[in-house]
Amino acid sequence: MGIANVVNMASHLRNASVARLGVTSVPHTKYNLSVALAMHRAGFLSFVTRGGTRPPDPATIATFEPEPLTTANAAKQRLWVGLKYSDDGPVLGEMSAISTSSRPVTAKLGALERLARGFSASRQRGLNIGECMFISTDCGTLEIREAVERKVGGLLLCRAGPPMRNFS
């Protein structure tokens, strides 16, 4: 069920960004947490925190202390993420899952290098300007450039990028 959660998270974050929500939540799972932290490092999310069914106050998020995780409350835990906005628009515009539970897509280092440079590989189109791809590796969930730097391949989880702009 792990990769299915990432597929749901990708569509949920894209929809929340289009709806211009400031804070949204996704189920607290290992895959969702690792992708959310990688997206935070890449600059798409303003914060990631664990919490219950009620959202934390964005004004006091720096000092927010979540309740301890126990077996009694583990099923109710959510990951609360803050979406970023810049120039009156969302930072996260497009987000789509690559691997699904019925079709996992993996890539070795050579394919990742081609994708990072903008060329197609592993039945995936290359990255555009401002776009990121997140990969599950032995070193954790990494953005594609981090994976190339560490010389590891892995499972392609999702791709995220800025909104498409019309310049006409």
Image (cartoon, helix red, strand yellow):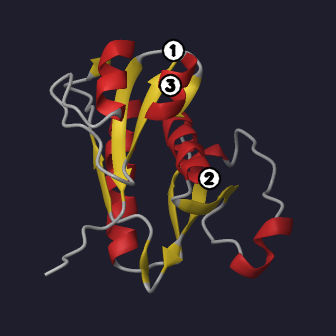
Label 2 and label 3: CA atoms lie apart by 30 Å
Label 1 and label 3: CA atoms lie apart by 6 Å
Q: Residues within 10 Å of mark 3 (few under 14, many from 20)?
A: many
> Residues at badges 1 and 3 in contact (C-beta under 8 Å)?
no
Q: Residues within 10 Å of mark 1 (few under 14, many from 20)?
A: few
The residue carrying mark 3 is 147
The disc label shown at residue 77, or none: 2
Tally the marks.
3
Instruction: Write the residue at 13% across / 81% down.
Output: 168
Instruction: Write the residue at 75% across / 81% down.
Output: 59
The residue carrying mark 1 is 151
Q: Position of residue 57 (x, y in %)?
A: 72, 78
**Most foreground residue, 129 or 132:** 129
Q: Secondary structure at mark 3?
A: helix
Q: Earlier in the sequence, mark 2 or mark 3?
A: 2
Residue flagged by tag 3: what amino acid is it?
Answer: Ala
> Residues at badges 2 and 3 in contact (C-beta under 8 Å)?
no
Q: Is residue 115 visible?
A: yes
> Residues at badges 2 and 1 in contact (C-beta under 8 Å)?
no
Residue flagged by tag 2: what amino acid is it?
Answer: Gln
Q: Secondary structure at mark 1?
A: loop
Instruction: Write the residue at 46% across / 78% down.
Output: 21
Q: Is residue 143 visible?
A: no
Mark 2 vs mark 3, foreground winner is 3
Q: Position of residue 102 (x, y in %)?
A: 20, 26
Q: In the visual, does 30 lie left or right of 98?
A: right
Q: Secondary structure at mark 2?
A: loop
Q: In the visual, does 6 lie left or right of 32?
A: left
Rendered-image quadrant of the N terminus: top left
- Above/below status of 149 relative to 21: above
Label 2 and label 1: CA atoms lie apart by 35 Å
